[in-house]
Amino acid sequence: MTSAVCSCKVGTVADSWGFREIHDQLATRWTEGECSVRELTDQFNRRLLRAGFEQSDRIPIDGEIENLYRVLTADGIDAGTRTQARERLRQDGVPIEEIESRFVSHQTIYRHLRNCLDVSRETETETAPDRIDSWRDRIDALRARTAAVTDRGVSQLASQDAIDGEEFDVLVEITVICSDCGQFYELGELLDERGCDCASTPAGTE
């Protein structure tokens, strides 16, 4: 396969930011079952973030790209921490607002794989990572809607002087508790770990 150029968001972003070679990597890792679509999405967006560093002649230290991407996108990160991260990047000349506006969704990556690169897995049967991604998306959509409704309600109450304060940040977190061992997990952590640690611990051991 040759590096593809297409008019979809994935193609135009990779072309304009100078990492067109990623098309082959995306296709290979997906068709060989190495990565789920969500994992490929994170890889693409991290590559875009690295391109922003390269454009500003800023050399990231080991693990910096991964940590910054987590701060910018992960659930449970407070708004103040994200603001501080963006400000540091601006001071270093990294065009972070433009980069974030170019981040792609996993639906966009999936369409790029199927429609632009014309690749598919050998089997269309959903894998475990695909099923996890599907449920994660449903839950994330509900969480985003809950956060939006809550934010609107709190803002109206504040504007009507029903509660004290002017500006609030709304975070909606989902905690899952293992019924067997009582361990608490943030939902994303549970899905990333594919379950609770106690399930892989032999009985009678610590």
Image (cartoon, rainbow, N blue to C red):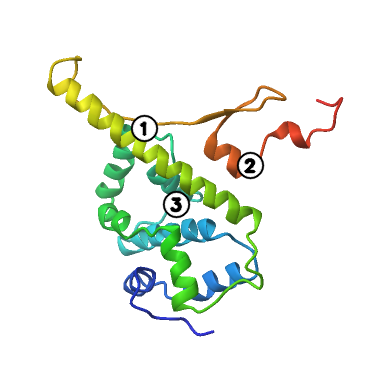
Query: Residue 83, position in %: x, y?
Result: 29, 38
User: In front of the other: label 2 or label 3?
Assistant: 2
Q: Which of 92 and 96 is in front in this view?
A: 96
Seen at 38% across and 57% down, the residue is 49
For residue 168, which quarter of the picture? Answer: top left
Camera-side mark, 1 or 2: 2
Query: Label 1, on which residue?
Result: 78
**Could you tell me if residue 21 is visible in this image?**
no
**Which residue lies under the disc numbered 3?**
65
Three-letter amino acid code at disc 1? Asp
Give the labeled residue for mark 2. Answer: 193
Q: Do labels 1 and 2 touch, CB within 8 Å?
A: no
- Numbered disc 3: secondary structure: helix
Quarter containing the C terminus: top right
Q: Which of marks 1 and 2 is nearer the N terminus?
A: 1
Nearer the observer, 187 or 29: 187
Instruction: Identify the residue at horizontal 43%, vertical 38% (top origin).
Output: 75
Dot 2, how many residues are within 10 Å of its Cα: few (below 14), some (14-19), or many (20+)? few
Q: Reply above or below: 204 against 25.
A: above
